[in-house]
Amino acid sequence: MEFLTEIAQQIIFGAVIGCVYALVAICFVLIYKATDIINFAQGEMVVFSTFISYSLVVTYHLPYWQVFIISFTISWFMGMLIESTVFRRLIGAPHLNALMVSVAVGMIIRNATGHIWTFDDLRLPPPFSDKVFQLPLGLVVSPLFIGILSVAIAVMVVLFIFLNKTKAGLSIRATSQNVNAARLMGVPVSRVFSISWGLSAGIGSIAGILIAPLLILNVGMFIVILKALVAAVLGGFGSLPGAILGGILLGVLENLVGTYLPNWVKHILVWAILLIVIIVMPQGLLGVRKQKRV
Amino acid sequence: MDKFLKIDNIETYYGNIYALKGISLEVDYQSIVAVLGANGAGKSTLLRTISGIVAPARGQIEFLGRRINGISSHKIVKLGISQVPEGRELFPELTVRENLMMGAYIRAGASEIVKDLDVVYQYFPILGQRKHQMASTLSGGEQQMLAIGRALMSRPKLLLLDEPSLGLAPLIVEGIYRIIRRINEEGTTILLVEQNANLALSIGRYGYVLETGKVSVSGKSKDLLEDEHVKRAYLGR
């Protein structure tokens, strides 16, 4: 019984982290679907946003709800800026170019972050209390975990409504399915590209605020964020529901392995999953067949 | 009065290919004009150039007295030119209704747009029955109907049709051409690109024949139907 309780507990912890992976996986998928680019700078973008949040919380003492909004907005414009200054110029170029450039952009952001703030470790105070309380069956949770879960789910719901119920959302989905047709409909597709980047950067900033209190905030945090890429691949790259499923699965799996197996297994687990999924089932769990034409 | 659409000696490169080598063409208000030609003659490039997807290297396109070459494709849609592209180019994982809503992307006014959905469903009742299905689940004929319906949703003054008969059974083609004629009778000017010369000349009053990026013959459809070269090369007589 005690063993089962512990497993359940670890699954809950894993799912909470998994929800944050899911958010970042969504960022990868949004940019990939809109522009066919796998954005390796995503991790550094999230870290940069999290440092902005750190300043807002620690230096300017703003309440957390304002931090979420301001950080989201600044990150949104940062995302659009990166798209319009760098990646828009690579439309039509070989995919490999955009991929390599995204690595370079990540390096630049990582160093800029360190020079603007610090290369040392910081602690982002949690947005919700991390004092645990008892649940039935001997489980424990903290308001922080409930808060992370709630905010992550709220972001996914709002995104779902935006994509499926608004005209802007419809035009983003249409453009990701057929750019040429979207142009013929009169969609300014470059604006759709920059909205996708803005949205990804903005959602990434929320993910950063949620996960940083559980970790150490420093420029190296990008490597944790990059695990979301594995979540996206596991779910089926290009599928938003897949990104969510992949994120939660990865979080749970990682946490269970970390609890019961030696530490080194945990450290290679995520990247081993990436290898195995790509070799054995490249379409992932909910992957869609690439279907460009009707 | 200004010509409705006047194309003056345009030259277009498509990638590295010199696709249009100086084409001039005119379309009168409320007419149907047909452009014939074999594969690779430049027909689709011509329509893409008019829609602003590719820019001509030289020459000029005037629509309603206004020069439109060099302006972006979404502005050209707003001016009233809408295209049904070759191969239909639907949004496969949007529903029929969502595809039609995308056709109305440049328009404001939700109630008018919803009314126009019903207009399209009157032209093509099968689309009304399938409005909640994904476009990718439709048959070829239904997809062509959806592509035409989608283009109509922007309320175009000029409708560009690229090979609407491609890959469809003769009976389906006949039905689609009946609707194209009706769309024209209700006031929309049509520029039609078609490999099937009989079909194109039966519906258009005026025709142009494209050969390797140039207009080789043009004239009234009834004259083209009697032209020896056209007969031999395109009508198989």
Image (spheres, coloured by chain):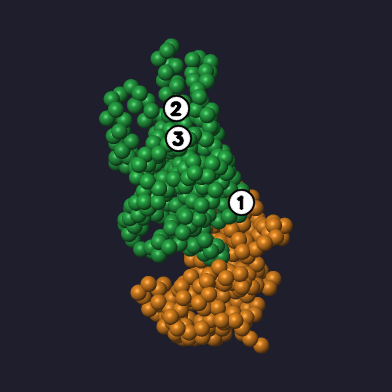
Whether pointer 2 and pointer 3 mark residues with C-beta atoms closer than 8 Å, the reply is no
Q: Which chain is drawn using green?
A: A
Look at the image and tell me in which quarter the N terminus of chain A lies. top left
Percent from the top left, x then y, of residue A106? 36, 52
Query: Mark 3 to mark 1: distance in Å?
Result: 34 Å
Mark 3 chain = A
- Mark 1 against mark 2, which lies toward the viewer? 2
Q: Which residue is mark 2?
A: A13
Which residue is identified by label 3? A213
> Which element is circle 1 on?
loop
Q: Is residue B222 above or below residue A156?
A: below
Confirm whether residue A13 shows in the render: yes
Which mark is in front, 2 or 3? 3
Residue depicted at x 52% and y 44%: A60
Q: Mark 1: which amino acid?
A: Thr
Colour of chain B, in one word, is orange
State the image coordinates of residue A34 (x, y, percent, origin top left): 46, 54
Q: Please, what is the three-letter code of the amino acid marked with disc 2?
A: Phe
Please name the residue that numbered disc 1 is placed on: A166
